[in-house]
Amino acid sequence: MILAVTGGKGGVGKSTVAYTLGAALSAVVVDADLGMADLPTGPGPDLHDVLAGRAAPLEAVRGGGPVALLPCGRSLAGARAADLTVLSEAVRAVEAEFGRVVVDCPAGLRADAGVPLAVADACVIVAAPQAFALADALRTRELARELDAGLVAVALNRIVDEAPVAAVSRALGAPAVSIPADPRVGATVETGQPVTRTDPEGAAAVAFSGLAERVRACEKQ
Amino acid sequence: MRAEHEPQTDGRVRDGVVSCAWRTSTVGHADAPVTLVALRVRNDATVAQRVRIRNRLDGPLASPRRRGVREPGWTERGFAGDVAAEATLALGYACITASESRPPVSLAALGPADAFDDERATPASVVRTLGDSRPPAAVSDASGAATDSTDSTALAESRIAAETVVKPRETADDSAGLPVTPSGSLPPPVGAWLNGLEARLDAAERLDGASVAAATATLSVHDGIDGLAATLDSDAAALRAIAARVEELRSRVEATDPPLDALRRLA
């Protein structure tokens, strides 16, 4: 199963949600934010190399940490040289080998956001709970619909007070899940440790487990 | 009346309710001719028809392309697509060959259009419709003028992306890994850090006298009021520490005078 984690706006915590959801689903997480990658990386071939034809997709998958990862390069030149039309087959190759893939998508509505949605079986939209952020979530929802990526749930991130769960759910046509604000979640990408592993009973981990359960339920259909 | 030696350059082919008027013209040199083929496909039926057009000229077909990807319906052999009810579809392509005195295409009416189940969006069609997302080549210009973001935080972040050309490293200690830069310019990691700091400063400055909507928008990207305040405090402390260290190193660099001539003689 290929799940795209998307969200029209930058800065909503999409990468953190993708990484933690990848941990909860035992999936390989692909950092497809070609121009602004931020999931952990290290020496070795990365997604820029795969999309430029320099490495096979499976060569770029890194195990050994809490989450299996196909990271992206950080250079401008790499982002320019990347052939997006190769991304679909790369993600499918990883799915064929590992079973589940979570794709961390870039912000925006251009081709780099669209190709992962086109290859995905389903998606999760990450949104900030503020009203102005919902316009972006709605546009992303429309794009996902055009590209046949069914919306599993909306993840409302960094919730402090009550989240407008019912209103968001009605507007976007899918369940809305609140993820409570938690500094350890914010630090996930830096530390590489998902909160589902470090504090599985905590409120944030429980929210992520609930989100993962919804994704698994869609798989069976 | 056409003279005998002049090639036929227009005509019409038909298949059932669908007909295709064609016109060819030849451009280029005699030793590298290109034939341009213009088609008008007419559907006389009261429902949309799926049609297939095959190139019959003896040469490679150059179809219309968008962003490097063939326009929908085109392949190296021709075109397949729908013509609306009682309507005309205009198409054109080029063929790397001299024109011939016979119809350049064959036409097949394949039946009502709604009987055909088109494929899901392909990566190529997504790239074509949604637009190029690659950073523009000019974005490494320090002024950032070439980026088209309307959000100055995203602008600062794309400047970070433009100036970060380092290989990924697992360790945080990269003092041995900083590249040597041409005199006067900042090493990319330093430039990137300073740009990030400047983006936060821009955000804080925007809050001064901003409307509620603008302030909320700014704060949401910077982890709220306390988040932004904390980051600015640590930015100020970091800048003070860096200023002190930079001043110390600068004096040492300017005072250092290794005996280069003597060393060269020994080498």
Image (cartoon, coloured by chain):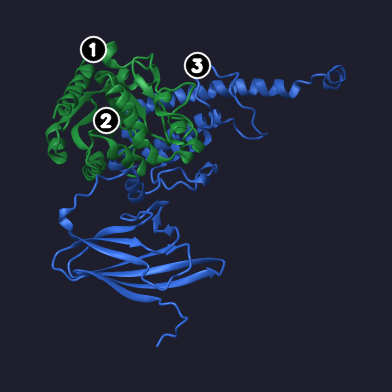
Chain colours: A green, B blue
Labelled disc at residue A200: 1
Chain of residue at mark 3? B
What residue lies at 19% left-to-right and 24% top-to-bottom? A211
Pick the residue in front: A102 or B1: B1
Labelled disc at residue A130: none
Quote the CA–CA distance across marks 1 and 3. Answer: 28 Å
Q: Label 3's element?
A: loop
Q: Label 2's element?
A: strand
Task: Evaluate whether label 2 is on the same chain as label 3.
Answer: no
Residue B5, given in percent of the width and then of the height, sits at: 47, 81
| Residue B147 visible here | yes
Quote the CA–CA distance across marks 2 and 3. Answer: 31 Å
Labelled disc at residue A2: 2
In front: label 2 or label 1:
2
Tag 1: amino acid: Pro
Residue A11, given in percent of the width and then of the height, sits at: 34, 33
A105 vs A147, left or right, is right
Quote the CA–CA distance across marks 2 and 1. Answer: 24 Å
Pick the residue in front: B63 or A3: B63
The image quadrant of residue B32 is: bottom right
| Residue A106 visible here | no
Judge whether A115 appears above or below B20 on screen: above
Chain of residue at mark 2? A
Residue B25, given in percent of the width and then of the height, sits at: 44, 73
Quarter holding the N terminus of chain B?
bottom left
Chain of residue at mark 1? A
Tag 3: amino acid: Thr
